[in-house]
Image (spheres, rainbow, N blue to C red):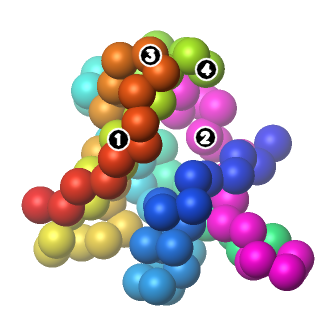
Amino acid sequence: MLQIVPYRLGMFLKQNVIDKLTLCGNTGKSQNVDVFLQNDEHYTTMIGLKWNEFCIGNNFRAAFTYRFKFSTTNLSVCHVFRDAPFSYEEMTYE
């Protein structure tokens, strides 16, 4: 199942024309996912089928929000961190 990403993350992916991501987690597990634009009025951004596998492999749960931290040397590499439950979406850049 494709996962719709938060607005700010979607805008970042669209503006930087990123169509593939390597997601890296705290457990050392990584997952390659494709980035899709839905053909709707907003060009909704979604990430690929492997997102669920990445979440399971990194013990992510639905009640948590996640921080996406991109490398400045390679924007297709993204470290994903779990925040405390019910915190706000935040993106940072290194």
Q: Residue 5: which disc?
A: none
Q: CA distance from mark 1 to mark 3?
A: 12 Å
Q: CA distance from mark 3 to mark 4?
A: 9 Å
- Of the residues shown, which amino acid type is indicated by label 4? Ala
- Ranked by sequence position, the earlier of labels 4 and 2 is 2
- Ranked by sequence position, the earlier of labels 2 and 3 is 2
Q: How would you rate the neighbour count of disc 2 (Cα within 10 Å): few for under 14, some for 14-19, many for 20 or more?
A: some
Discs 1, 3 touching: Cβ within 8 Å: no
Indicate the quadrant containing the C terminus: top left, top right, bottom left or bottom right: bottom left
Image coords of residue 90 (percent x, y): 34, 47
Front residue of 15 and 73: 15
Image coords of residue 46 (percent x, y): 68, 59
Asked whether 8 falls inside the magenta stretch, the response is no
Read off the residue under disc 2. Answer: 51
- Ranked by sequence position, the earlier of labels 1 and 3 is 1
Image coords of residue 33 (percent x, y): 56, 55
Discs 3, 4 touching: Cβ within 8 Å: no
Looking at the image, residue 48 lies above or below residue 51? below
- Of the residues shown, which amino acid type is indicated by label 2? Trp
Q: Residue at x 76, y 77 (%)?
A: 42
- Ranked by sequence position, the earlier of labels 2 and 1 is 2
Read off the residue under disc 3. Answer: 85
Q: Residue at x 26, y 27 (%)?
A: 26
Read off the residue under disc 1. Answer: 67
- Ranked by sequence position, the earlier of labels 3 and 4 is 4
Q: How would you rate the neighbour count of disc 1 (Cα within 10 Å): few for under 14, some for 14-19, many for 20 or more?
A: some
- Of the residues shown, which amino acid type is indicated by label 3? Pro
Callout 1 secondary element: strand
In magenta, the rendered stretch is: 39-57
Q: How would you rate the neighbour count of disc 4 (Cα within 10 Å): few for under 14, some for 14-19, many for 20 or more?
A: few
